[in-house]
Amino acid sequence: MGEQLIGEYVDHAPGYVDNGETKIVTSRFEYSDSFTLSRYAATGGYQALGAALARTPADVHGEIRDASLLGRGGAGFPCGVKWGFCPEGVWPRYLVVNGDESEPGTYKDRLLMERDPHQLIEGCLIACYAVGLSQCFLYVRGEMALAQERLAQALNDAYAKGYVGKDILGSDFSCDIVLHWGAGAYIVGEETALIESLEGNRGMPRLKPPFFPAAIGLYGRPTIVNNVETLSNLPWIVNNGADAYKTYGSETSPGTRLFAVSGHVARPGVYEVQHGVTTFRELIYGDRFCGGMRDGHELKMFIPGGGSAPWLFPEQLDLPLEARPVGGAGTMLGSGAIVIMDETTDAVRACLRLVRFYARESCGKCTPCREGGVWLEKILQRILDGHGRPDDIDLLLDVGDNISPGPYPRAGWEAEGLEPIPFPPKQTTICPLGPSAVAPVVSAVTRFRDEFEARIKTRIPVNAAVSAAHSAAAPVAAPVTAAD
Amino acid sequence: MSRLNDTNLATAHEIISRYPRPKSALIPLLHLAQEQDGWVSEAAMAHIAELVGVTSAEVMGTCTFYEMFKLEPVGTYLVNVCTNISCQLLGGEELLHRAEAKLGIKAGNTTPDGMFTLEDVECIACCTEAPCLQVNYRYMSRMSPAELDLVIDGLRADEFAEAVPTHGTLARVRQHIPADRAAGVALPDSADEPAWMARNRQAEDGSDG
C-alpha cells in the first residue's frame, strides 16, 4: 500500500472495505466523486428532504422513533427518544453535530464526512425539520482538514441550490448550517464539553444530571447533540421507512453500523455490517471481512469499542455486535472501533499507551481523573522501565478504584472462575474520561498479571529504546502508600 | 507578529455574524490568525478579543486548552506521528524514532532551519491504515521508515507544495453563506417558535377543535 504514497499525496487515506453486504450509509463510497453534489443528486440525493417536508414534523419524528435508530457516538441511546426530550414550547432549539471523532481506534465519521458530506447535510436538515431546530452547528474535529474542506464545498453548493438556508425547497422551513471546527482536544467529543467549546470556552464537561443538553444546552437553550453516523442514516430511513430499516440488523439494534477494525488482522478496514447480527468471530475471521489474523498469528485480546472499552479475549469471540450482550459481558461497543492484538503484543506496553492517552487528554476539571490518570501512567512506565515495585500492581488497582470505585467492568474468565462484571463503571468524575483510563489497567492486570509480575521481578527494562522516549516526561513521585 | 490583516478582518466579521453570540467565533478566529502567521501571537489574541468583545485573558484561556494552537512559531511543516494503540501495534513508535533520527530532533521540537516541527500525537483517526502520520493535518498512511525518509526529503524539495499547504491552513475552501440565502442566526433570547413548527401546531390545534 505504502508505495503509492511516495512522491504523491493521497486525497483521502483508504480504509473503507466493501464487503458486498447491505449499504445504508456507505452506498456512494464506490464512486470517486461521491462527495460532489452532482453525484449525490444523481443517486437520489435530497429526495428524502423533499419527502420529509411534505409530511408534518411530528410524523417524521415518529418515523425515526419507530426505526429505533440507536445513537452511533458511543452511548447508543435511541435517537428518536433523545429528540423527544426537548421541553415543550421552549425556543429556539439548536442542533449540534458531533464530528469530533477522537476515540483511539475510531474513524468511521471521518470517512462519512469526507466521502459523503451531502448525506450528512441532508440528515441534519431532516433532524432540524422534525424537531424544530432553528440553527445547526456542524462541529468537525480540528485535525480533519479534508473533511472540513469537503463539507465547506458541499455546504456552499447546497446553499446555492436552495437545499440549505432560507425557505428550503420553497417551503417555510429555514435553517442555517454553520461549519465549525475544533482545535485538538479529545474531551470535546463529550457532548457538554462540545457545547462549551462551541461557546468559545475551554472544552470542559458540564455537570449532568439534572440538566441534559436537550433541556439546557447551547446558550442555555434546548440542544440536540447527534453523532455524524447517526444523522447519516436519516435520509435512508425517510426514503425507505422505518419498517424497511428494521429488516436489517437485530430486533433491538436495527440497521447497519460502521466498524473500524484495526491492528493485527489480515485485512483491516472500516466495514458496514448488520447491527446486532454479526459476531466478533465473523468480523475478524470471515472472508468477507478481515480474513483472520495476520499470517500465522493468534488472537491474544481485542478492544471491542474504542480505547475506553475493557478488553475481550478469544472466549468472547461469539458475542454479537450489539450493545446489550457486550455490556453484559463486561465492556461496550462504544464507537465501533475494534482493535485486534495478537500474541506478539506486550500487554503492559499496550496498557501504558492507552493510559497515557487518557492522562494526556484529561481536561483537568475533576481531581481523580487529572491526578489519577497521570499516576497510573507513571506507575506503568516504571514497571516497563524495570523499576517496578512489588506492590505496584495493587497500587494500580487502588488508584483506579479512586477514579472508578467498586468492581470495575471486565470480561469473565472461565478458566479462573471469574464471572464478567457488567458495564458501565461507577465514577467519581463528571464525565467518563476518568473511568476510561482504568479500563486497560483492570483488563490487563486481571488477565495478564503474570506479565506485570515478571516485569517487576526481573527488573530488566524491555524495549528500553521505546521506553526511554516516553520517560522523557519528568518522573514525578508516585502516590505514597503505607508500604513506602 | 501581527493583528489580522484587512482581508482576514473581513473574513473574521463574516464568521462572527454566523453565531448567535460572538464568543462562539473564538476558535475559528484563532484558526484564522494561525493561518495568517503560522502561529498565534499575543497581538492576534488581543485583536480577536476586541472583535468578539471579551478580554485577552479569556482568549488566551481558550487558546491554551487546544493542542493545535501554537503559541510560538513552529516549522513550515508540522509532522505528527501517531503512536496510539493501533499505530503502536504496527510500528508507530519505531516510526517516530526514525523521524527523530532523520530530522535530528526529539519529538516536540523544531529543526534549526525552521522547516519541520515533530510531534508525538494521539490517535488521528486513520487506524486501519497504521502506522500513519499527518503533515500539516494531511494524511500519509501505512508508512514504512524508508517511506518516511522519502516524505521528509520530498517536503524539503518542495515536492508536496500542492498537496500540503504551510502550517496554519486547514480547509482551503471556506464556507460562505450568501446573504440572500441565509436563514439568519437563532438568537437564544428570541423565544421564536420556528415558522414550520407553528404552522403545523396550528393546523393540529385546528383539526382537534
Image (spheres, coloured by chain):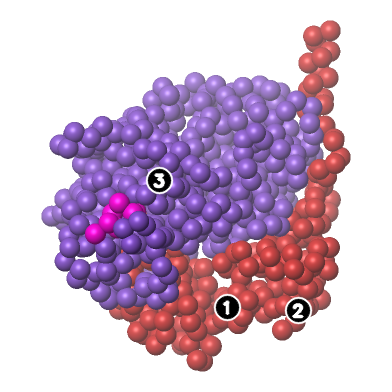
Residue at screen point 79% across, 21% down: B201
Place of residue B66 in the rendered image (x, y in percent of width and height, measured from the top left): 60, 64
Image marks 2 and 1: residues in contact by CB distance under 8 Å:
no
The answer for which chain carries disc 3 is A
In this view, the residue in front, B6 or B63, is B63
The answer for which chain carries disc 2 is B
Pick the quarter of the image with the C terminus of chain A.
Answer: bottom left
Between the C-alphas of marks 2 and 1, the distance is 21 Å
Q: Is residue A276 above or below residue A31?
A: above
Place of residue A59 in the rendered image (x, y in percent of width and height, measured from the top left): 66, 21
Residue at screen point 77% across, 58% down: B23
Q: Is residue B72 above or below residue A205?
A: below
Q: Main secondary structure of the magenta part?
A: helix
Same chain check for tags 2 and 3: no
Residue wearing tag 2: B43
**Mark 2 or mark 1: which is in front?**
2
A323 drawn magenta:
no
Q: Which residues are magenta?
A: A390-396
Name chain B's colour.
red
Residue at screen point 42% across, 73% down: A473
Between the C-alphas of marks 2 and 3, the distance is 46 Å
SS label for mark 2: helix
Q: Amino acid at mark 2?
A: Ala
